[in-house]
Amino acid sequence: MTTLAIDNIGQLVTNDPSLGEGPLGIVRDAALVIDGNRIAAVESAGAQADARIDAAGRAVIPGFVDSHTHLVFAGDRADEFAARMAGERYAAGGIRVTTDATRAASTEELTQLTERRRREGIRAGITHVEIKSGYGLETDSEARSCEVAARFTDDVTFLGAHVVPAEYQDRPDDYVWLVTGDMLAACAPYSKWIDVFCEEGAFDAEQSRAVLEAGAAAGLGLRVHANQLGEGPGVQLAVEMGAASADHCTYLSDADIEALAGGDTVATFLPATDFSTREQYPDGRRAIDAGVSVALATNTNPGSSYTTSMSFCIALAVRDMRMTADEALQAATLGGARALRRDDIGHLSPGARADVAILDAPSHAHLVYRPGVPLIAATITAGELAWSDPDSRLGHSP
């Protein structure tokens, strides 16, 4: 099997304290040796391998793990975004605007749109994604969305319980019955997870519990959209039921913090959403200081967070959520892996999947120091060079 060395790394972030300095396991003047699709070794600069990439003093980090995305959709909601920037408040019901376009799109069109967004994420250093359904809201459309998502990731989430579609507006319990019955049966073969939007305007605690219990009975892991628009039952329901992640967590009570800190559920913050909806930002500092396990994700979607830039989310987390640059980077890598209950990604320890981002900067702190600047020089996924910025002039020899 061919080996590859990323050599002359100025600062290597491994996320493994046993390999280097501090919680990020930073190694200076390093080389990262890759054997096939796995990390083989962390060595000093000058390591030997069959092929070589010269990082020329740049920083190298684990590829971003984006544990919350909605990449499968059709249509555009730019007008809604502009109206919100002009003062209108975000409401969960806006999701229905995308439903008609997604239902009408062909499978080929949905695949092409998803591939375009996934390629954009790779250029932004995102080496692994979770992808949700949730814009079909009928059995065939949801199953098709999950099938398309499965072409791009093994972390597919069935989100039929995104909102109640218009045709069920006056009988939401009938829609929950559909989601937990025929729709779940059609989507489960493509899915690893089930999710529910537990929020005013979407699904209440009782309905959300029914969705999660049905998903668990079908063998799916649990995720919850929780506490985005205000305090509510979502976070504590997620912890009670052993969900891998409670996502958004914009509004957290003391009881929510206590529950998260005492459980195994990761609080996944989505700061680009709060930026786009003009909501308050989550208090990341408060959660971390209380011992809560946290992640950062983009929440790529057409209505409330149409971005694939994890770097932007990191900058927001440091600027507006009181997280340090180290904490934000770890939340966007190892934190995302934990939110997906994976130990093969999010770090660069020997044996981990070789998902790597090379920065066009000497330190990961530049992700915050230079907000809005595209600093990904190259992205390596499972040991393969997935993208390289031609302007970075990375030395690459076979």
Image: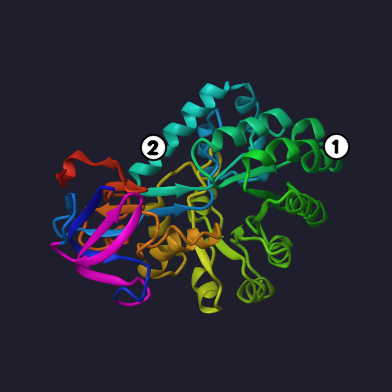
Q: Residue at x 56, y 78 (%)?
A: 290
Q: Secondary structure at mark 2?
A: helix
Q: Which mark is residue 119?
A: 2
Dividing the picture into quadrants, the one containing residue 256 is bottom right
Can residue 42 be seen in this snapshot? yes
Residue 203, given in percent of the width and then of the height, sits at: 76, 49
Mark 1 or mark 2: which comes first in sequence?
2
Vertical comparison of 181 with 64: above or below: above
Q: Is residue 187 left or right of residue 7?
A: right
Vertical comparison of 122 with 283: above or below: above
Quadrant location of the C terminus in the rendered image: top left
Q: Which mark is residue 170?
A: 1
Residues in magenta, as a range: 21-46
Residue 303, given in percent of the width and then of the height, sits at: 56, 40
Residue type (three-letter) at the residue carrying disc 2: Arg
Q: Is residue 123 left or right of residue 112?
A: left
Can residue 93 be seen in this snapshot? no
Q: CA distance from mark 1 to mark 2?
A: 40 Å
